[in-house]
Image (spheres, rainbow, N blue to C red):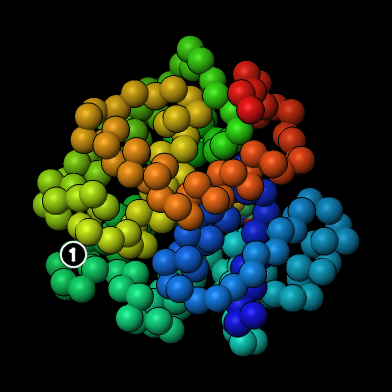
Amino acid sequence: MDATLLISSKNYSSWSLRGYLLVRLSGLPFQVKSVAADDPNVRAELLMRASSIRVPCLIHEGVQVWDTLAIAEYLNELRPDAQMLPKDLAARARCRSISGEMHSGFSALRASLPMNLRAKQTNFKVWSSAKADIERITEIWRECLGEWKGPWLFGAAPTVADAFYAPVVTRLLTYGVTVDPVSTGFCEQIMAWPDMKTWVADAKKEPEQIEELDVDMDF
Ligand SMILES: N[C@@H](CCC(=O)N[C@@H](CS)C(=O)NCC(=O)O)C(=O)O
């Protein structure tokens, strides 16, 4: 196998999901290795394999790349034909901008609606700061889908940006957040992505549970 992607939980780790979708987009053959980062033995093993404890971490022919933006750029350089970034310069700039915005922002959404693919919450109260994040995210989606005509953010095929926003879609579904029709259509597109379906199915089988996050479970 050419490459290994170190991840943590498929159910809870949105960064691991982004890493997985990115490697799938590149077409690079790889295996996924799950590591429980809170287990001291696993942490020690992880540190021996990679100089950072962060997941996701891509190990490819002796090169270690961690942090999803770095993984995206590495894979794009390694496999330019995969067109992980749009061909057009302006579209590519937008794709990088919105992926960066996701990577460094939306902390209220991330903190108050943690990813939990197995769960379904009803009557969940979304606080105003998270609401503002959701409004900004759906604005980004509507602009891209309007300009590049969908069904993906940059047109006919998924790019890095779709991988970055995919975990947001799962959060909206988990916490029963309704959004405008254009954004709802995009959510359906993401959930129908075969790689998403594989990941979600695996997440549902994962034994690991974090009690605080698992109220109102719906398997
Ligand atoms: N900005 C990073 C975030 C990665 C991240 O926060 N990873 C968490 C798990 S989802 C992690 O590695 N935690 C383990 C630790 O901090 O030791 C990225 O883009 O990959």
Q: Is residue 164 visible?
A: no
Nearer the observer, 63 or 97: 63
Q: Which residue is drawn at 41% across and 50% down?
A: 193
Asked whether, in this view, residue 133 is left or right of residue 109, the answer is left
The residue that mark 1 highlights is 91
From the viewer's perspective, is residue 214 above or below residue 168?
above
Q: Is residue 3 left or right of residue 143?
A: right
Q: As drawn, which residue projects farthest toward the right? A: 41
Observer able to see residue 81:
yes
Where does ligand 1 appear, by image quarter?
bottom right
State left or right for residue 36 relative to residue 217.
right
Establish if 187 lies above or below 1. above
User: Which structural element holds mark 1?
Assistant: helix
Residue occupying the point 64% across, 80% down: 1
Of 189 and 179, which appears nearest the observer? 189
Picture residue at 64% right of the left edge, 39% below the top: 204
The kind of residue on which mark 1 rests is Ala
Q: Position of residue 24 (x, y in %)?
A: 48, 66
| Quadrant the C terminus occupies | top right
Position in image of residue 212 (x %, y %): 70, 27
Residue 124 percent coordinates (x, y):
49, 17
In the rendered image, the residue lying farthest to the left is 147
